[in-house]
Amino acid sequence: MERIILNRRVWVEGLLMVVISLVSLAESLRLISYEDPQMVTDLLGPGYYLLLMSIGMLITGIVHIYHHRKERSVVKEKSSKEMRIRLMGSFVACVIYLILINTIGYSTATFVFFILMFRIVGIRSWPYNFVLSALLSVVFYFVFVKFCNMVFPRGILF
């Protein structure tokens, strides 16, 4: 008699996605039902966007667990030193981004963040890194600030 044993990593990933999606689903329903009389709200509001994203994440978590249900847990993978360094570098880049976004504003902080992240993931050419970071920063600016009318910090220096 053969039992199907899910890999621990798959369980943790899938259940974490399901739990986070359920929490965000509850928050989206709260945002949809609550209206602050002192705030200007748009027709859709943030609750519907969060609802859509949480439903997508819930489906993804369930599909992830279901898709990997027949994998057996045989060997524990050890994370390499390079991967740990990249993970810590990404964490430090995010902290730097959080500090810079309030100091120098969204646009400049996003450009610096992309330069750091592209170096961390392995893009070593400075000209290519610079052009790619500038291009993505401009695209993000137009999508979020101009197209979606989101307000981001300008920074205390500007």
Image (cartoon, grey):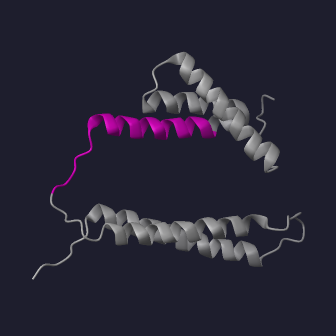
Is there any visible trace of residue 101 in the rendered image? yes
User: Can residue 103 be seen from the camera position used here?
Assistant: no
Rendering quarter of residue 88: top left
Image quarter of residue 61: bottom left
Residue 97 lies in magenta, yes or no? yes
Read off the magenta span: 75-98
- Residue 87 coordinates in the image, percent (x, y): 40, 40
Q: Residue at x 56, y 72 (%)?
A: 23
Q: In the rendering, at what x and y percent does residue 80 appear?
A: 26, 39
The residue drawn where x is 23% and y is 65% is 71
In x, y percent, where is residue 102?
71, 38
Q: Is residue 5 left or right of residue 102?
A: left
In this view, 134 is above or below 141:
above
Q: Please tell me whether residue 145 is drawn above or below residue 119 in the rendered image.
A: below
Q: Nearer the viewer, residue 92 or 11?
A: 11
Kindly give the residue lying farthest to the left in the view shown: 1
Q: Is residue 89 left or right of residue 72?
A: right
In the shown orientation, is residue 99 left or right of residue 22?
right
The x and y percentages for residue 57 are: 53, 66
